[in-house]
Image (cartoon, helix red, strand yellow):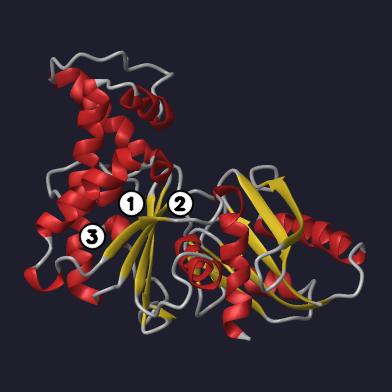
Amino acid sequence: MQIAVGIDIGGTNTKWGLVTNKGDILKEGVISTKAYPEAKQLVDAVAQNLQKALDELDNHSLIGIGIGAPNGNYFNGTVEFAPNLSWEGIVPLQQLFEAHFDVPIWVTNDANAAAMGEMQYGTAKGLRDFLVVTLGTGLGSGFVVDGKVAYGHDGFAGELGHTIIDIQGRQCGCGRKGCLETYVSATGLVRTVQQLLQENQLPSTLEDNALLTAKRIGEAAHTGDELALAAFDLTAQKLGLALANAVAITSPKMIILFGGLAQSGDLLLLPTRQYFEDFLLNIFKNKVQLVNSIIPAHYAAILGASALVWNAT
């Protein structure tokens, strides 16, 4: 039985799984990323966990390892200046894993891995032109054009979250102002509610305190909270505009939303669809499907990373 390893390195936790080409996860595990401040320490710990799991699995052949990581560079197998990791500079992640495993190893950023997962296991199966937008703490994106992830000349193409939509806008962690992810993300939604609480007189059960989270805002919106609904509407407007602009560049057949904020369901999806169609150039209207991912959120990162292996073999 052929299997691939999928590894997702996040700022808080690192997840791994042994995956078949049908998307069945035979074994999985998670360790704390923050417990290993040096990249080599984390790789050594993950490799030890993986080897133990592989030894416990009968009748298998490991054909490769796929890794999704912040600022992962597919061309170089490196993680470069990742903002949410303690690692500094350029880290040769592929080489570190090659010291433990004699199989092909691929590295890419987490959003591109999500796009690969959608093409291998999800809604985009069989599609050659689509876009995946991950809505979590920030906003990631993976563009697939003619069946291939668009990496650009340096491996960093497709940063929709860092397109500027307001030059006088909110401060972004990248150092600039007005990036899309400062409005369209879990943290962006919280910032929008905080702004509305200061500026508006809309009735609301929400308060600007430690309990104010994207999940809490979604719960309030589901109960009809006017301010929460206004925040989702503003978020949808920004996202709809950005997606309409993206369509003019690559003309995808489908756009797939994934991540914690996308799990708010129709609260975000329906108004985004409306704004998206309103902003689209006429030649693209009613041609592009905008949907939520069907891949279970708990497994998506592992499946996405493992899809790097199956796509290459």
Tag 2 residue: 83
Tag 1 residue: 174
Tell me the SS state at disc 3: helix
Nearest the eye: 116 or 86: 116
Circle 2 Cα neighbour tier, 10 Å, few/some/many (<14 / 14–19 / ≥20): few
First along the sequence among labels 2 and 1: 2
Residue most toward the front? 286
Residue type of the residue flagged with mark 1: Cys
Label 3, label 1: how many angstroms apart (C-alpha)? 21 Å
Quadrant position of the C terminus in the picture = bottom right
**Residue 162 x %, y %:** 29, 57
**Rendered view: 169 above or below 69:** above
**Residue 75 x %, y %:** 50, 80
First along the sequence among labels 3 and 1: 1
Label 2, label 1: how many angstroms apart (C-alpha)? 8 Å
Query: In front of the other: label 3 or label 2?
Result: 3
Residue in view at x 22 percent, y 66 percent: 246
